[in-house]
Amino acid sequence: MSSAPDTSAGQAGGFRLSMLLNDTRYRGLTFQFIALAVIIFLMFWLGTNLVRNLAAAGLNISFRFLGETANYDIGQSLIEYSSQSTHMRAAMVGLLNTLLVAFLGCVLATIIGVTAGVLRLSKNWLVARLMSAYVEAFRNVPVLIWILVIGTVVSLGPSPKVYLGDDPERGLFLGLFAFTNRGLTAPAPVFGPGSLWVVLTLVASIIGVIAYLKHRKKTLFSTGTLLPTWPVPALLIVPTVLVFFILGQPIKLDMPDPLANRFNLQGGFEIGRPLIALWLALSVYTGAFIAENVRAGILAISKGQTEAAAALGLRPRRIMNLVVLPQALRVIIPPLISQYLNLTKNSSLAIAVGYTDITATLGGITLNQTGRAIECVLLLMLFYLLISLSISAVMNVYNASVALKER
């Protein structure tokens, strides 16, 4: 009685070095190992060469300068800072300023981009052409030019003197805001005892609104019943207002006062002209690119989806919100991540309008004062890398949540 030959022993013990290149099971790993070894060698060679050249020039890599006194002022700071603070403190101020303009820019650019992208597909000829003109104008002109143009426009505002004195030439806008060539002066909140509970109530209300909207959407998709929208403002406003008055109005407003000083507005807080100019420029510029992403995502959805939704009796606005945009997000989100990253990196042009970001502090004044070019540039690269990776990580999580999930 014959049996099949046993080849397991030959297969198990037949490994040869030539199989690293000839066998497809090992070839990919072999090339990856070679590439990794070459990269490690190049990095080691560059690092050794850098250290050797610095030693020959009598220099060394040191970050002790971060503990030295900065000796320069910063116009706008989110944390306490003075000219006697350290270079590390100045770098932190610049980093926070960068994060501030990046966050505000991404929010406003998204609003502008989504609005322009949807309106560009409008059946109204005038609206569609205006949006097309906006997109083409901002996409085809360098962002630096737009930063300078918008910075110049913002600087053409009136002098604070027009708001000052017993008989000012003009009153505050809505009695609250003053627009000048120095920026925007607005009421500043003053938090008293018990204000923490008001803030926590507001946060809880926002969480409740999000939970209700998710439940409303789930109910619509599962049963076809559309729950009312009036609970949304009720949940958002009523609990916070009740807690606010029960605790005796612990949050006050420090209002701008044009009568307190004949030289400048007193009270409130001022949003500087450089921040406004950079924020608006980056937002409208990036919004033009986001508009094209939105338009492409909407056009990627089959017209049959719109026709089917219309046949069910949905109105155009609900068709866009419930049918088209949720599907278009799968096309919009990946390029949207790139636009957020571009906006964050373009904020390094802030020095063009005098806004003090991380590039102006660490990569500008600190570098010139200390002469530590290598250290400052390395830290600057690290900061931007961490910011970009953080934005990508957050957006990739959201992208995974809206991705098409097959059964």
Image: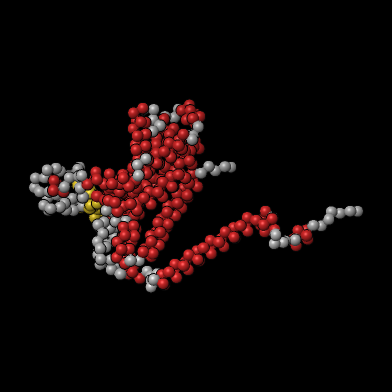
Left or right: 295 as drawn, with respect to 157: right
Colour style of the rendered protein structure: secondary structure
Percent x, y of residue 226: 43, 35
Percent x, y of residue 85: 27, 66
Compared to 127, does 287 lie above or below?
below
Compared to 26, does 404 lie above or below?
above
Q: Nearer the viewer, residue 275 or 235?
A: 275
Give the residue displayed 26% in from the left and 47% down from the top: 151
Give the residue displayed 34% in from the left and 34% down from the top: 133
Percent x, y of residue 149: 27, 44
Q: Nearer the viewer, residue 311 or 195?
A: 311
Q: Is residue 141 among what the camera can see?
A: yes
Percent x, y of residue 265: 16, 51
Q: Nearer the viewer, residue 301 or 157?
A: 157
Q: Quadrant of residue 53?
A: bottom left
Q: Nearer the viewer, residue 198 or 107?
A: 107
Q: Quadrant of residue 379?
A: bottom left
Left or right: 73 as drawn, with respect to 120: left
